[in-house]
Image (cartoon, rainbow, N blue to C red):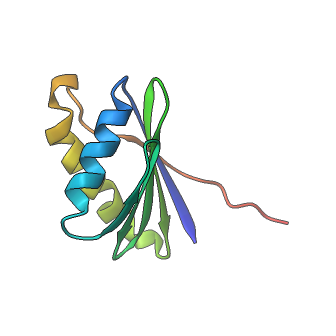
């Protein structure tokens, strides 16, 4: 499993968590609490969370080649939802694999 992490600096993380989960729930399986949402896309699961100054997305991807799909689905929706903050894209990074 490959882990792709995204971060968007914003004081509106709770709002975007709710908007993203509500929007995606029309097309895919979504579970949501006040502080976290899980969205099950065909290419992997996204866990969305936030703190006081950031929105976070963590994708679990079985195929690293799906990175573009993962980035695009979140970034494209946030471009519309966070237009007042001049959003362009999240800061995306691969999580290092733990080797034992």
Q: Position of residue 91 (x, y in %)?
A: 41, 39
- Residue 29 rendering spot, x and y as whole percentages: 33, 70
Q: Nearer the viewer, residue 4 or 77?
A: 77
Horizontal side of 93 relative to 8 (left or right) equals: right
In-front residue for pair 58/48: 48
Image location of residue 28, percent across then percent down: 27, 70
Q: Along the horizontal axis of the image, is 36 left or right of 23? A: right
Q: Which corner quadrant holds the N terminus?
A: bottom right
Tell me the quarter of the picture where residue 45 sits.
bottom left
All told, the count of numbered labels is: 0
Name which residue lies at 75% across and 60% down: 98
Looking at the image, residue 61 lies above or below residue 35: below
In the rendered image, the vertical position of residue 11 relative to residue 1, given as above or below:
above
- The percent position of residue 6, horizontal first and vertical second, equals 44, 45
Point 37% across, 35% down: residue: 14
> In the image, what residue occupies the spot 30% across and 35% down?
15
**Quarter of image, res 100:** bottom right
Q: Residue furthest right?
A: 100
Residue sitting at x 24%, y 45%: 19
Q: Tell me where residue 30 sits by quadrant.
A: bottom left
Left or right, 80 with reference to 75: left
């Amino acid at each position: 499993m490959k882990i792709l992490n995204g971060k968007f600096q914003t004081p509106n993380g709770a709002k975007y968590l709710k908007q993203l989960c509500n929007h995606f729930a029309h097309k895919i399986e979504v579970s949501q609490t006040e502080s976290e949402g899980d969205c099950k896309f065909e290419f992997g699961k996204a866990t969305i969370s936030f703190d006081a100054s950031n929105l976070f997305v963590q994708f679990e991807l079985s195929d690293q080649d799906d990175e573009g799909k993962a980035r695009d689905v979140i970034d494209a929706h946030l471009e519309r939802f966070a237009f007042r903050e001049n959003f362009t894209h999240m800061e995306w990074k691969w999580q290092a694999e733990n080797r034992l």
